[in-house]
Image (tube, grey):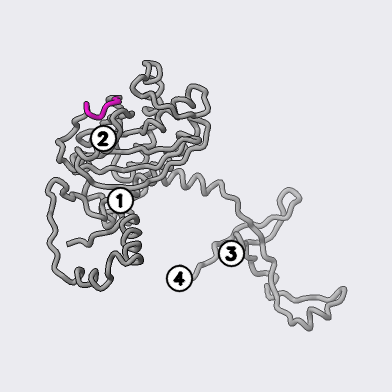
Amino acid sequence: MAEEVLSQNEIDALLSALSSGEMDANQLKQEENDKKIRDYDFKRALRFSKDQIRSISRIHDNFSRLLTTYFSAQLRTYVSISVASVDQVPYEEFIRSIPTKTILNIYSVAPLSGRIIFEFNPNIAYAMLDRMLGGKGSSVNKIENLTEIESTIMTQLFERALDNLKEAWSSMIDIDPLLEDFEINPQFLQLVSPNETVVVVSLNTTIGESSGMINICIPHVVLEPIIPKLSVHYWMQNEGTKESKPEEYENLTAGIEEAVVDVSAQLGQSKITIDELLNLNKNDIIELEQPIDAPLNLLVDQQPKFLVQPGKKKKKLAVQIIDEVATKGG
């Protein structure tokens, strides 16, 4: 059975009880040694492993960065979005946890089945709307009284954010997200059965001086076809065997071809002692190790690459490539 992980609040409460004498450390140790029986709630069945939850968190870390850039450009104000938590809960619990009046966007994510929900906290949603209408980004909760124009502006803002969702999921699967519905009352939403497990990704969001949460609800039915891909083993294996696409190779080649490198012809080299260097005088001659009839080395970024012979071209010094320098092991 998996170990139970305490939250920070539970840890603080436990330490406080121990320090105040309300709880005896020896008694706690004895209870730990006793065999424990815990009730199992089948309504809260965990259908995703910790490994798979971490993969989902990794995807949405990338999504939050993309969304931060997108909203910063659209709203022209300070925006900060980051993943706060990724949990799996019954759908009914998710619906109960969000405000009775909020901004709900329902997306289809073809080719995956089912739909996902984006819940924008009223503080965040109205701050976005205020910025789009030329305001300072003040947060006034009037969600239930949104006009048709205000609803349209919000819908268009959220629709344009879909490219970021598509890019974030591209490492896992190519999806074609589509905004299907815009709702303000969660009680009207019944995407799956109340006991169905959903993954809820909560994003800490700050728009200007307003802050709140963006919650993404992903039902199990949506993720079911790609569950095998959510393991770290799949990610590592996929990275190791992934073949480059032809256009990626062409782009890489074109980029390398534009790179600038230093090229120099080495006339020769010699070794002298420090004493000889200190006693050098005008008209002294240093003999090079390079025979006068031997080809010269052409260095590319200080590395010997070609054998060349010196000459002239249009009244300028030039070299002509004779052969390629043999590399070690070549």
Within 10 Å of disc 1 (Cα), the crowding (few <14, some 14-19, many 20+) is: some
Residue for badge 3: 303
Say whether disc 3 or disc 2 marks the residue closer to the N-terminus. Answer: 2
- Residue flagged by tag 2: what amino acid is it? Ile
Q: Quadrant of residue 286?
A: bottom right
* Alpha-carbon span between mark 3 and mark 2: 56 Å
Q: Is residue 178 magenta?
A: no
Residue for badge 2: 116
* Alpha-carbon span between mark 3 and mark 1: 43 Å
Q: Nearer the viewer, residue 60 or 151?
A: 151
Say whether disc 4 or disc 3 marks the residue closer to the N-terminus. Answer: 3
Q: Quadrant of residue 216?
A: top left
Which quadrant does the N terminus fall into?
Answer: bottom left
Residue 179 location in percent, x, y? Answer: 30, 27
Magenta stretch bounds: 183-188
Foreground: disc 3 or disc 2: 2
Q: Residue 55: give its label.
A: 1
Q: Is residue 184 magenta?
A: yes
Q: Is residue 247 something that shows in the picture? A: no
- Does residue 225 sit above or below 272 in this rendering? above
